Image (cartoon, helix red, strand yellow):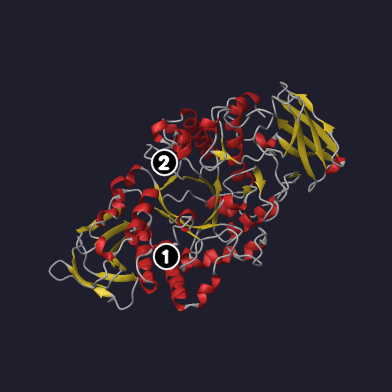
């Protein structure tokens, strides 16, 4: 390892030196703990008796070799403070961990032969192609029983999740955090093992087999990554060497709103740790991208613009993204960021943060607010649906309907549609057609596609029994058709980030709640027309240089399949709460 680079925050491969690695007929163990008075290794290989570790290099690193240590054995570092007390810690760079509430690290052999060479050669970052992401919580997509701690393994999910996502028309999975975490309710966002795939679902190599299988089915895999904060559990990173090694010493900036500790990004050792973790998932597991959680909390102190920009954290993001792109040019880097901070998706070499995409949380909030409102208020709220295009080209945006929108009293996406049960389905169909006609890549959380009616609970599987009801079965079939249409029509994605790819045909029907959009790309033009009022309406639509409209998809039945202009306009009959796509000939 480049020690100077480690201290100055330039290293992306610290995990290849630190942690536990096979060496001959045993394992060599190394950890970074500059303020420890002494450290002993304890584990199954020594019947949990202390094996002294020796200072190496500049005295800030500790090392020992254990003969006959084998993969699958558990271990911890017993770190003695200057006052003589000690805490047993898991390995910050460990490749496996016990299932909570236990906390030992587990020795892993990471050797695995991937069979995805073709996928890796063809892989792109999706900017000029279709990117339709299915966000999944691994433990609650399906469960083998109703028991909260019953989960399918990474390998068992190969035949459950991958065929379903492919059949439904998604070409990428986004997996909520899989790095080890102790509290189920944190969903993985309060991490204890940044290099350890959670033991809930199996081992490192089982996860690699899952990703490998996704690639053989031409499905990419993005993993949620948490570079801003970590769990407070005393056996993990907190006060690792008896001092705040990874966190801030002051609680004023050191504790997050979620009750976790914020990383101190001004320390080079912390930067190298996080950069190495990000690179680890891309390099060792062939992940196709990382969705970076809570980026706004890195840009601004505590995520509050009034407290000012956290310059060290911003520089960390730039350096990390630059280094990841140098090593993995086709990997996707997406930012969850709700701020107005500039140049989030501008390359780091040009002064930006270096992300490929930014979640458009403004679009999400405005659009859901619009559909929650009654039809009688939609004239007032009309331009909530046009506002996003006023800032859209400032970043490369991705349109998310994520797990955060279906929990904590917000209701599911279907529930958030206004009106009675039977009125929610036509509105949801029109809503999704509007989403897919809007520029920007797409993300949809599991359950949304079947019209889930119960808020997501990480302890329960999705309510697949809903598909016994025709309304939900029909909705799933509609979503499948919409997804497949999106993947096969370049007008809906090729020009996402070019102004010529999008045009308002009509966005001034405030009283009628009608919108008309043109999308262009790949040599085709599509017109998307929406009536979000509760009334059927006859509508005259002008489209430049259009000789004919051919129906591509309708959210409702009974729409004519061909329209020809009369006097330069197309006469359309729009049913209530409806959307329609036409190919422009």
Q: What element carries label 1?
A: helix
Sequence-wise, which precedes: disc 2 or disc 1? Answer: 2
**Viewer can see residue 313:** yes
In the rendered image, which quarter is residue 481 located in?
Answer: bottom left
Write down the residue under mark 1: 415
In front: 158, or 414? 414
Q: 10 Å neighbourhood of mark 1: few (<14), some, or many (≥20)? A: many
**Image depth: mark 2 or mark 1 in front:** 1
Say which quarter of the image contains residue 94: top right
Residue 425 lies left or right of residue 198; in this view the side is left
Q: Residue furthest left?
A: 567
| Left or right position of 356 against 553 | right
Quarter holding the N terminus?
Answer: top right
Counting from the top left corner in percent of width and height, residue 60 is at 70, 24
- Image location of residue 133, percent across then percent down: 48, 57
Residue 166 is left or right of residue 49, and the answer is left
Considering only vertical position in the picture, is 467 above or below 91? Answer: below
Q: Which residue is drawn at 31% across and 61% down?
A: 373
Q: Which mark is drawn over residue 345?
A: 2
- Image quadrant in which the C terminus is located: bottom left
């Amino acid at each position: 390892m480049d020690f100077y680079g480690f201290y100055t925050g330039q290293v992306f491969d610290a995990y290849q030196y630190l942690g536990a690695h096979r060496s001959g007929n045993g394992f060599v163990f190394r950890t970074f703990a500059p303020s420890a008075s002494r450290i002993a290794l304890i584990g199954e290989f020594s019947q949990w008796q202390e094996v002294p570790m020796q200072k190496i290099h500049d005295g800030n690193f500790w090392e020992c070799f254990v003969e006959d240590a084998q993969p699958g054995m558990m271990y911890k570092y017993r770190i003695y403070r200057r006052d003589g007390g000690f805490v047993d810690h898991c390995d910050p760079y460990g490749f496996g961990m016990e299932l909570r509430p236990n906390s030992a690290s587990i020795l892993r052999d990471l050797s695995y032969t991937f069979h995805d060479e073709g996928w890796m050669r063809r892989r792109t970052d999706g900017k000029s192609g279709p990117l339709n992401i299915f966000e999944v919580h691994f433990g609650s997509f399906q469960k083998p029983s109703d028991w909260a701690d019953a989960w399918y393994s990474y390998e068992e999910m190969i035949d459950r999740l991958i065929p379903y996502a492919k059949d439904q028309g998604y070409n990428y999975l986004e997996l909520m955090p899989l790095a080890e975490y102790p509290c189920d309710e944190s969903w993985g966002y309060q991490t204890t093992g940044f290099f350890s795939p959670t033991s809930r679902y199996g081992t490192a190599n089982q996860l690699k087999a899952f990703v490998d299988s996704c690639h053989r089915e031409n499905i990419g895999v993005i993993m949620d990554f948490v570079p801003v904060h970590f769990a407070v559990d005393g056996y993990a990173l907190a006060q690792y060497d008896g001092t705040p090694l990874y966190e801030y010493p002051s609680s004023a900036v050191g504790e997050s709103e979620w009750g976790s500790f914020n990383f101190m990004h001004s320390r080079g050792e912390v930067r190298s740790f996080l950069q190495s973790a990000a690179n680890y998932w891309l390099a060792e597991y062939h992940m196709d991208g990382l969705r970076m959680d809570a980026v706004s909390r890195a840009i601004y102190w505590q995520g509050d613009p009034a407290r000012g920009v956290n310059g060290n954290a911003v520089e960390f993001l730039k350096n990390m993204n630059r280094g990841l792109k140098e090593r993995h040019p086709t990997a996707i880097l997406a930012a969850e960021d709700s701020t107005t901070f500039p140049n989030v998706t501008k390359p780091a070499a040009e002064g930006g943060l270096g992300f490929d995409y930014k979640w458009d949380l403004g679009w999400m909030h405005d659009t859901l607010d619009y559909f929650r409102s009654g039809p009688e208020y939609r004239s007032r709220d009309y331009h909530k649906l046009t506002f996003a295009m006023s800032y859209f080209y400032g970043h490369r945006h991705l349109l998310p309907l994520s797990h955060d929108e279906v929990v904590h009293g917000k209701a599911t996406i279907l529930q958030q549609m206004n009106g009675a049960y039977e009125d929610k389905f036509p509105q949801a169909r029109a809503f999704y057609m509007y989403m897919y006609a809007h520029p920007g890549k797409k993300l949809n959380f599991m359950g949304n596609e079947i019209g889930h009616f119960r808020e997501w609970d990480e302890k329960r599987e999705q309510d697949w029994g809903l598909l016994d009801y025709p309304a939900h079965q029909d909705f799933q079939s509609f979503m499948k058709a919409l997804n497949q249409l999106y993947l096969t029509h370049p007008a809906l994605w090729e020009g996402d980030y070019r102004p010529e790819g999008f045009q308002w045909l009509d966005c001034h029907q405030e009283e009628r709640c009608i919108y008309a959009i043109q999308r262009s790309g790949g040599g085709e033009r599509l017109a998307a027309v929406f009536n979000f009022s509760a009334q059927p309406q006859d509508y005259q639509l002008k489209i430049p240089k259009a000789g004919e409209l051919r129906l591509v998809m309708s959210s409702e039945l009974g729409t004519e399949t061909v329209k020809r202009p009369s006097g330069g306009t197309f006469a359309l009959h729009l049913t209530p709460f409806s959307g329609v796509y036409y190919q422009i000939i």
